[in-house]
Amino acid sequence: MSETNHTTIATWVMPILAAIEPFCDAATALKKAGIDAPCIQDSNQRVAVDKMRTLWEFAEQVSGDDCIGLEAIKYISPTSFHAITYAHHASSSMRESLERLQKFSSIISTAVGLDIHDEKDEVVVKFHMAEDIFEPNYHAIDAFMALVVEATQALLNNSDKNILSVRLKRDKPKDTSRHEGIFKCPIYFNSDLYEIRLAKQFVDQVVPTGNAELVRINEQVMAEYLLRFNKSDIVASVYNALIELMPHGEPTREKVAAVLGTSSRSLHRKLNELDTSYKVILDDTRKHLAMQYIKQSDLSITTITYQLGFLDSSSFSRSFKRWTGNSPSDYRKKMNS
């Protein structure tokens, strides 16, 4: 994917326009960035990242605000990022939500992705840029990272002390009060990376209001969205096909290939070029859905087994124990206790 092919969800434009409304009318800003006005209220539309970079630069210029990204997030609505916000609020832990954001971050922008890993008692969230583009405008990264932190605060109480540190590549702003007010932790400007560190215990804390059924529905909506705007995303295509096929029996590579209108050999080759395989995607999809289904007490282990396309409960139990170290029934008992 080249620089001009990377895109951002069109509804991201609206908060930026709202932030600079006191300084400039929307029509002028859109014309400056070369963005079509009719598309910006439709989450199914995309805007090229180079146009978004121009818009952010113009926003700072007209406002004189070197923290305009933090101003723009005040105007974010629950529908600004399609179904991501709804899935987040239905999550059963912050880790679950972060892993989902890692998986579906391209809905917001194909230019920025997330890497998540544990380091002792900390969970490190790194924001990395696509290799084939220029560095995105730092206001966009400010806003993205601030939204992640605000999302943790919305999901769990007393989260402030559990955000351990934030690193930003940008220069230190003239006034750091807005960054300090949002992040509420040590902030390192002029860093060589974008990073948020969170307390591991906090990230894994169970959210009592989690709703696995709502998560599943919103994830399917997001997977279908990804397919619509990027039909070349073969991994998303396989994921979507698996969701469709698994309740009807063992989903073989041949069956998935048939749904995608390709051959089993071609599917294997395309996945191999992406350093993955059908078995890896199947296992990841089953694990991900199993962790959602097991939280639904009204679903029996047998029902979950067949929802995930396993031939029998013993096969499902073996896989579940490999994923978690526990049998499905033991895991459910621990979770309920």
Image: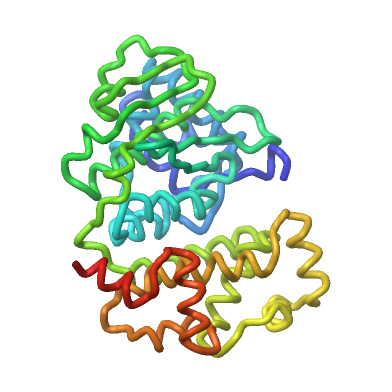
Residue 267 quadrant: bottom right
Q: How is the image coloured?
A: rainbow
- In front of the other: 289 or 223: 289
Name the spot of residue 291 as percent of width and height, x first.
39, 68
Q: Quadrant of the C terminus?
A: bottom left
In the shown orientation, is residue 321 left or right of residue 35?
left
Name the spot of residue 295 as percent of width and height, x first.
30, 71
In the shown orientation, is residue 39 left or right of residue 151?
right
The relative height of residue 2 versus residue 254 in the rendered view (above or below) is: above
Residue 276 quadrant: bottom right
For residue 320, say whether it is visible. Answer: yes
The count of marks equals: 0
Which residue is rendered at x = 33% and y = 86% of the image? 300
Residue 174 quadrant: top left
In the shown orientation, is residue 234 left or right of residue 149?
right
Task: Return the residue found at the far left.
Answer: 158
For residue 144, say whether it is visible. Answer: no
- In front of the other: 311 or 129: 311
Which residue is rendered at x = 78% and y = 76% of the image? 264
The relative height of residue 294 versus residue 84 in the rendered view (above or below) is: below
Q: Quadrant of the N terminus?
A: top right
Name the spot of residue 63 as percent of width and height, x first.
38, 20
The relative height of residue 130 versus residue 212 in the rendered view (above or below) is: above
- In front of the other: 60 or 336: 336
Which residue is rendered at x = 35% and y = 26% of the image? 165
